[in-house]
Image (cartoon, rainbow, N blue to C red):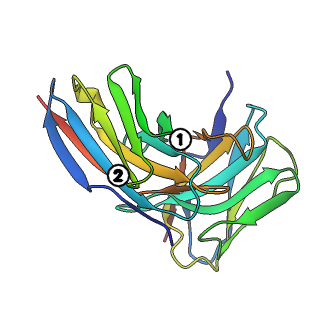
Amino acid sequence: DGGITQSPKYLFRKEGQNVTLSCEQNLNHDAMYWYRQDPGQGLRLIYYSQIVNDFQKGDIAEGYSVSREKKESFPLTVTSAQKNPTAFYLCASSEAESSYEQYFGPGTRLTVT
Amino acid sequence: GQNIDQPTEMTATEGAIVQINCTYQTSGFNGLFWYQQHAGEAPTFLSYNVLDGLEEKGRFSSFLSRSKGYSYLLLKELQMKDSASYLCAVKGFQKLVFGTGTRLLVSP
């Protein structure tokens, strides 16, 4: 079955620690995205990548970093510089920049205390 | 700037029809999307409009007026499982911009 996987579903970390969220897709999609969702707010774009070894900042990139070394993988690191890291993180992919539909992974709920 | 407005919450009765509105002001327009999201789950694609008019897909329909910056999602024959958040999103030049979503509560 083709799809997007994110792991783990729930993640707990202490303040001051960096944490990396995994996102893998086997849809052969070129473009991948990371969003953050907070209660009462829409999805906000953190980073996106249209091709391997290239990525761009989204609207709220501060305190986050990404890499795109493989087409299938787009991990997101939440650094200690992110002031409010507790949120629901969603990864998505689409066939290409021009493609209109994004497919979402199941999400990772990160709690930092 | 970019701005997408949707009502925060709506309620409806099982079997009824509900219309969820979305107004937008964005720099660049390459289509408008509706996604359904159940609590704690990933959004799933419902519809896509790039030209003016109505797109029908089973119980769900979506309408777009580009000149008015307006769209709506119409849900017919509501079922309990339709209780979810409905996200309106506009595609600009390279990325999607999402509204805050409308939480729909369907009661028996």
> On the same chain: label 2 and label 1?
yes
Residue B50, disc: 1
On screen, residue B33 versus residue B107, left or right, reads right
Q: Secondary structure at mark 2?
A: strand
On screen, residue B105 versus residue A27, left or right, reads left
Whether residue B37 is situated above or below residue B1 in the rendered picture: above
Of residues A19 and A73, the one nearer the viewer is A73
Give percent across and percent down for residue A113.
48, 71
Residue A24, disc: none
Give percent across and percent down for residue A85.
54, 69
On screen, residue A63 versus residue B10, left or right, reads right
- Please report, as a chain letter, where disc 1 is located: B
Q: Secondary structure at mark 1?
A: loop
Q: CA distance from mark 2 to mark 1?
A: 14 Å
Examine the image and state in which quarter residue B34 appears: top left
Q: Which residue is mark 2?
A: B22
The local crowd at label 1, few if under 14, some if 14 to 19, many if 20 or more residues have their Cα within 10 Å, is some
User: Residue type at mark 1?
Assistant: Val
Residue A20 in sight here:
yes
The residue sitting at 28% across, 31% down in the picture is B75
Of residues B66 and A57, the one nearer the viewer is B66
Examine the image and state in which quarter residue A95 appears: top right
Of residues A37 and B64, the one nearer the viewer is B64
- Pointers 2 and 1 in contact (C-beta within 8 Å): no
The residue sitting at 73% across, 47% down in the picture is A97
Give percent across and percent down for residue A70.
86, 46
The residue sitting at 72% across, 41% down in the picture is A24
User: Residue type at mark 2?
Assistant: Cys
The local crowd at label 2, few if under 14, some if 14 to 19, many if 20 or more residues have their Cα within 10 Å, is many
Give percent across and percent down for residue B79.
23, 25
